[in-house]
Image (cartoon, helix red, strand yellow):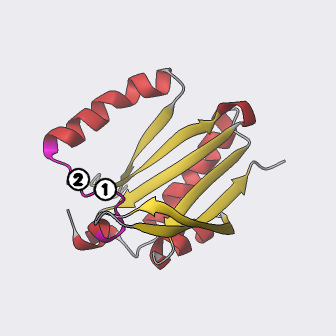
Amino acid sequence: TDEETRRWSTTPRIWSAEDCRAYVAAAPSLWIAGAEARFAVVDAATDEYTGSVGLRVTVPAFRVGEIGYGLRAAWRGRGYTARALRLVSEWAFDRTALARLELGTAVGNIASQRAAERAGFRREGLAVRRLPTSDGGRTDEIRFGLIAPG
């Protein structure tokens, strides 16, 4: 519900506590189905929840996955997002058949773009008016990719 998250959200929906519980409860069945892996980002020193990363298999025939992520406001600017993206990417390449990971950020979301780049993703292009905005409009998206090592 924080202002920065709302600024970059692709929907006007604000998640309730019940929405969050349902999101977490669905994680095991989505993973078993091979559709999505959901990860909590947790501070190792305090065990406090700081954010989440989701990995969806978007083009199974081509072994392509898409990563989405978000971090709670109090934890931003500390490198958690880049580290979480690196860890999930390494996990995906080690534990799944994925050969390529992709992610996108709204063109103005510089912090998210920097985190992606620090995690090793490369800027690949611009998708014009690809993302819906929370106010009903559309915005351009910067696309990033990461190829499996080897």
Count up the numbered dots: 2
- The residue positioned 46% from the left and 78% from the top of the image is 108
- Residue range highlighted in magenta: 7-17
Are the residues tagged 1 and 2 within 8 Å (C-beta)? yes
**In the picture shown, does residue 102 fall above or below 118?**
above
**Image location of residue 78, percent across then percent down:** 41, 73
- Tell me the distance, in whole angstroms, between the alpha carbons under discs 1 and 2: 5 Å
**In the picture shown, does residue 47 fall above or below 114?**
above
- The secondary structure that most of the magenta stretch takes on is loop
Q: Label 2 neighbourhood size at 10 Å, few (<14), some (14-19), many (20+)?
A: few
Residue 121 in which image quadrant? bottom right
The stretch drawn in magenta includes residue 131: no
Quadrant occupied by the N terminus: bottom left
Secondary structure of the residue carrying numbered label 1: loop
The stretch drawn in magenta includes residue 15: yes
Position of residue 117 in the picture relative to residue 32 (left or right): right
**Image location of residue 44, percent across then percent down:** 37, 55
For label 1, the residue is: 11
Kindly identify the amino acid type of the residue bearing the numbered disc 1: Thr
- The residue positioned 30% from the left and 35% from the top of the image is 24
State whether residue 79 appears in this view: yes
Residue 28 in which image quadrant? top left
**Image location of residue 30, percent across then percent down:** 44, 27
| Front-lying residue, 61 or 88 | 61
Kindly identify the amino acid type of the residue bearing the numbered disc 2: Arg
Secondary structure of the residue carrying numbered label 2: loop
For label 2, the residue is: 13
Position of residue 124 in the picture relative to residue 76 (left or right): right
State whether residue 119 appears in this view: no
- The residue positioned 43% from the left and 55% from the top of the image is 69
Residue found farthest to the right = 150
